Image (cartoon, rainbow, N blue to C red):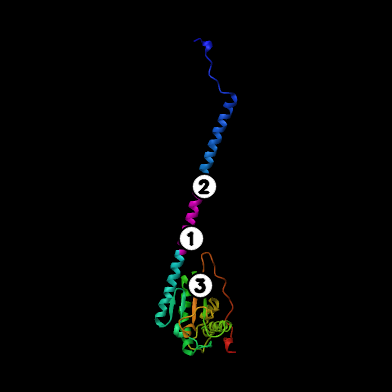
């Protein structure tokens, strides 16, 4: 066959030659962007995972500190039979039981409170207490007899009676020191639960508890009052 009969292979057009490098570069760019995206996502996920793990470690350390603090209060109850610690609650049981429809505590009950609460205040001054303790809520309880509003008011009066006992200065037996009474004023709040948390019997329901509340991670305690104790320690319930 003659050379004249052979057809020369088709040469790519200049348009094809011009476009081919562009599409190859665009594909490589997309691949590179995808790799960068995956790397960025991996780094972000690792950072989030590390942050979660760190937060969980901090929470675990906080819970351990609080458990140690409550264990020290539990140890203090050894000298006060009948006073128990349940979780983060101090229950005075029969040692501070109220008579029916009454917010008064007898002298023995008042002495017990003024003897035991300084143990709790000492724990609050402990480094762990300084770090985590937010406040102490005095909770009064009532039995199911009587109306809801009457019992709610009665339970609040029982809580207030506890603070009256603690804030009583000399010549009250076992009176707290001025520093301890200032600490009570800064840390203690009152709460009433009416008959929302009944015990097995009416007598057991007429009780008081101290509930310790703790700071969350990143939470700070509010400023304490700088005022001195006032001279009038009379209980408003007795007016």
Within 10 Å of the Cα at label 1, are there few (<14), some (14-19), or many (20+) other Cα atoms? few
Which comes sooner in the sequence, label 1 or label 3?
1
Mark 1, residue position = 55
Residue 79, position in %: x, y? Answer: 40, 82
Identify the residue at image location x=58%, y=87%.
237
Identify the residue at image location x=57%, y=32%.
22
- For label 1, the SS is helix
- For label 3, the SS is strand
- For label 2, the SS is helix
What is the CA distance from the residue labelled 2 to the residue labelled 3? 41 Å
Q: Which mark is residue 222?
A: none
Which comes sooner in the sequence, label 2 or label 1?
2
Mark 2, residue position = 40
Residue 116, position in %: x, y? Answer: 45, 82
Which comes sooner in the sequence, label 2 or label 3?
2
Q: Nearer the viewer, residue 49 or 115?
A: 49
Q: Which mark is residue 213?
A: 3
The magenta segment is 37-59
């Amino acid at each position: 066959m003659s050379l004249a009969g052979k057809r020369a292979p088709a040469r790519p057009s200049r348009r094809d030659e011009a476009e081919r490098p562009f599409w190859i570069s665009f594909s490589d760019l997309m691949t590179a962007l995808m790799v960068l995206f995956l790397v960025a996502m991996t780094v972000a996920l690792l950072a989030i995972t590390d942050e979660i793990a760190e937060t969980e470690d901090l929470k675990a350390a906080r819970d351990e500190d609080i458990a140690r603090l409550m264990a020290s209060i539990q140890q203090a109850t050894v000298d006060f039979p009948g006073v128990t610690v349940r979780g983060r609650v101090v229950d005075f049981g029969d040692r501070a039981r109220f008579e029916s429809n009454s917010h008064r505590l007898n002298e023995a009950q008042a002495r017990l409170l003024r003897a035991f609460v300084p143990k709790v205040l000492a724990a609050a001054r402990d480094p762990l207490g300084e770090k985590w303790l937010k406040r102490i809520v005095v909770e009064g309880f009532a039995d199911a007899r009587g109306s809801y509003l009457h019992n709610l008011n009665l339970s609040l009066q029982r809580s207030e009676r506890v603070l009256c006992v603690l804030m009583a200065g000399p010549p009250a037996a076992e009176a707290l020191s001025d520093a301890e009474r200032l600490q009570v004023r800064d840390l203690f709040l009152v709460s009433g639960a009416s008959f929302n948390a009944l015990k097995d019997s009416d007598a057991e329901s007429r009780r008081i508890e101290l509930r310790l509340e703790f700071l969350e991670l990143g939470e700070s305690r509010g400023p304490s009052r700088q005022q001195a104790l006032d001279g009038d320690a009379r209980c408003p319930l007795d007016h």
